[in-house]
Amino acid sequence: MRFAWPNGYRMAVCLTWDVDGESGVYFRFPERAERLLGELHQRLFGPQVGIWRILQTLERHGIPGTFFIPSSVAEMHPDVVEAIVAAKHPVGLHGHLHEALETLSEAEEIAVLERSQCILAKHCGYVPALYRAPAWELNRRTPEILVRHGCRSDSSLMDDEAPYALETQAGPLIEIPIQWALDDAEYWAHSRANRDKPLADPQTVLNFWQSEFDGFYRSGGCYVLTLHPFISGRHATMQTLERLIEHIKRFDGVWWTTLEAVTAHAEALLGAGTLPVRRSPPPSAES
Ligand SMILES: [Zn+2]
């Protein structure tokens, strides 16, 4: 069955950025962060250069974005959050130091979530209620913790191409699915640690992203592109995004929107009893 979009739209397009900056290096490689500068400075390209190019591109095309920001990045680069909020793009939660959720106890996970809500609220003027797990990796506890802390939606899972409600003990959480092929990191994340993996040809990536869009247009899904300012805020990669935007603009009935607006629409469908409701698989095949 086709997903029911508002106002006669046949599908939604959400351009999203995870503004990770240098945060993940401090969490994943603390010893390297103490000794070495290269990776930290590469990632600084995001908040220092990439994000400004991205905001200009969105403004030029008159389309919105959604920005997930680790709260440590908000503290280190308050001007970035200020500019995103001033341009009326919604901000979502993405950990404090881009913490991998599988490494945290429940108490630590809750402390990180509350800290990130508190810090981002100071910078945004509201408590963000959209969530994306660092590296898209939710643990079994996370959906329920998110609902208990007032989060309205998550965008980290890959089991569909349109929003649905994920059941938790605390109530439903709207899930807006993503996928590896629509993530810039898979093609262009490059550092000393993975120099064996070549950077992808931008034309190949454009073909992939356009083919996925064409399919979403036929099926009526929610096309969510996940990008990172430090990875695809450079010239050839930004040009790929520009060409994708130009391709999509040739189609009628496309809702260029944000995960905030998609969340609100999915909540309305849930209230009307017309949003699919799903459960996570059990922890073992026997249970
Ligand atoms: Zn991230």
Image (cartoon, rainbow, N blue to C red):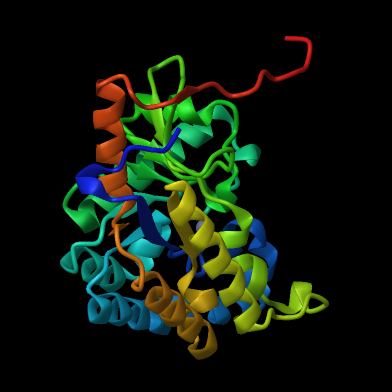
| Residue 41 in picture, x, y percent from top left | 54, 81
Find residue 16 and report its image quarter.
bottom left
Q: Quadrant of the C terminus?
A: top right
What residue appears at the point 62 percent right and 60 percent down from the top-left corner?
A: 181
In this figure, what is the number of numbered marks? 0
Is residue 150 at all visible to an observer of this figure? yes
Foreground: 233 or 145?
233
Spot the residue most to the bottom: 235
Query: Which residue extends farthest right?
Result: 196
Quadrant location, the N terminus? top left
Horizontal side, residue 83 vs residue 223: left or right? left
Is residue 119 placed above or below 111 in the rendered structure? Answer: below
Q: Nearer the viewer, residue 77 or 191?
A: 191
Residue 60 horizontal/vertical position (percent)? 25, 82
Horizontal relation, residue 231 to residue 69: left or right:
right
* Residue drawn at point x = 19 percent, y = 69 percent: 87
Residue 30, by quadrant, is: bottom right
Q: Is residue 248 left or right of residue 25?
A: left
Depth check, front residue: 53 or 36: 53
Asked if 90 appears above or below 264 in the picture, the reply is below
Q: Is residue 44 visible?
A: no
Residue 259, image x, y percentages: 33, 49
Residue nearer the viewer, 145 or 286: 286
Residue at point 28%, 50% (across, down): 9
User: In the figure, 147 relative to 249: above or below?
Assistant: above
Relative vertical location of residue 23 with respect to residue 92 in this rendering, above or below: below
Residue located at (23% from left, 77% from top): 59
- In the rendered image, residue 242, in percent from the top left (x then y), is placed at 41, 81
